[in-house]
Amino acid sequence: MTRPVPSSDAVSARMRRQRRRDTAPELGLRKALHRRGYRYLVDAPLPGMPRRRADLLFPRLKVAVFVDGCFWHGCPTHATAPTANHDWWRRKLNGNRARDRNTDHRLQDAGWTVIRIWECTPLEEGVRAVEETIAQARSQQ
């Protein structure tokens, strides 16, 4: 999919500043989990899926955690639709969501547990989701 011409220099600059990893919500989750004694891989490649990575990976327990951006992954509460280059962005964002679903299914089929946390989720809620999933995975070992 060829990139469209940016609608302005300001938009172009803003998009260049978007982080792929180490976003504030991701860093907050990592720091909170680390303080609680959890150890994990960061921005780790997914087994058998080239070019796909998890934000946090607990390989021994087969738990993959994704901190999804509201814009990029279509948060039901905060997603927005750009007006400039609308058709291109619609295809791009729908493709992101389809890839997310495909990744989830492939990981689950391989015996992994997938946790998806929206960037807008309160930190403690995200930490609790990971801790509960880790506790359940440990009890099944």
Image: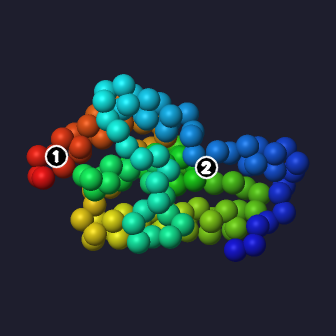
Q: Is residue 19 above or below residue 51?
A: above
Q: Nearer the viewer, residue 38 or 80?
A: 38
Position of residue 73 measured from the top left corner of the image (x, y, whole percent): 52, 54
Which amino acid is tagged 1? Arg
Q: Helix or strand or loop: what does disc 2 sit on?
A: loop
Q: Nearer the viewer, mark 2 or mark 1?
A: 1
Task: Tell me the quarter of the image containing the N terminus.
Answer: bottom right
Which residue appears at 28% of the width and 60% of the height?
Answer: 112
Left or right: residue 38 versus residue 44 is left
Position of residue 56 measured from the top left corner of the image (x, y, whole percent): 41, 47
Which amino acid is tagged 2? Arg
Which residue appears at 62% of the width and 69% of the height?
Answer: 91
Q: Nearer the viewer, residue 89 or 130?
A: 130
Q: Residue furthest top?
A: 35
Number of marks in the rendered image: 2
Q: Nearer the viewer, residue 76 or 106?
A: 106
Position of residue 99 measured from the top left corner of the image (x, y, whole percent): 48, 67
Q: Residue furthest right?
A: 9
- Mark 2 touching mark 1, by CB under 8 A? no
Q: Nearer the viewer, residue 130 or 122?
A: 130
Which residue appears at 58% of the width and 62% of the height?
Answer: 93
Kindly identify which residue carries mark 1. 138
Left or right: residue 115 versus residue 1 is left
Residue 20 is tagged as 2
Q: Earlier in the sequence, mark 2 or mark 1?
A: 2
